[in-house]
Image: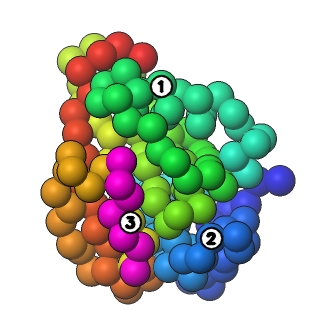
Amino acid sequence: MPYVVDFENVSTVGLESSPFAETLAGLRANEGRYYRNKYDHVFTVSPAGGLPEVVDRVRRILKEERDIVIGSRPLEVTTFEVEGLRMDYVFYESGLSINVMYSIEDGGKRAVGFKLAEGMEIPEELASRFKFARQRSKLAGVIRGSYFVIKGEY
């Protein structure tokens, strides 16, 4: 069942199995607030099993672009389009959030972003490949993030 992310009353709905449920919920709410404020988009997530094509697309891009395989179980996903960008998000049990920003037009911005919930260690599969910058968020505490540019066509 889809869940509209509430960034005023942060909830762990759908994330309860994560040891970082509270901070992951804050991270998810932070994303919801960003898309509401910037694009007037309502950030709605679904259980990962309900949209396997999103999980598969993100897995494929990670594998083909950087030979990355995420070891954690995906909990929730969303996919939507705003201003010519297709956005895919996967929230993992480990506290990791991955988003794929893919410009629909050729030559536009295309990237994969990683965000870690506060308290989460950098996953082994990412630690040696990326440097993570810190950012402070009212909703999520300290967010650490990194990204890479997508070179292929998906």
Whether 85 is drawn above or below 19: the answer is above
Residues at marks 3 and 2 touching, judged by CB atoms closer than 8 Å: no
Q: Amino acid at mark 1?
A: Arg
For the residue pair 100 and 67, the one nearer the viewer reads as 67
Q: Residue at x 62, y 50 (%)?
A: 74
For the residue pair 50 and 60, the one nearer the viewer reads as 60
As measured in the structure, the alpha-carbon distance from the residue carrying label 2 to the one carrying label 1 is 24 Å
Of callouts 3 and 2, the N-terminal one: 2
Query: Which residues fall within the magenta stretch?
Result: 119-125
Of callouts 3 and 1, the N-terminal one: 1
Q: Which residue is mark 3?
A: 116
As measured in the structure, the alpha-carbon distance from the residue carrying label 3 to the one carrying label 1 is 21 Å
Q: Which mark is residue 60?
A: 1
SS at circle 3: strand
Of callouts 2 and 1, the N-terminal one: 2
Q: Residues within 10 Å of mark 1 (few under 14, many from 20)?
A: some
Q: How far across and how far down the image is residue 55, in percent?
A: 59, 36
For the residue pair 95 and 43, the one nearer the viewer reads as 95
SS at circle 2: loop
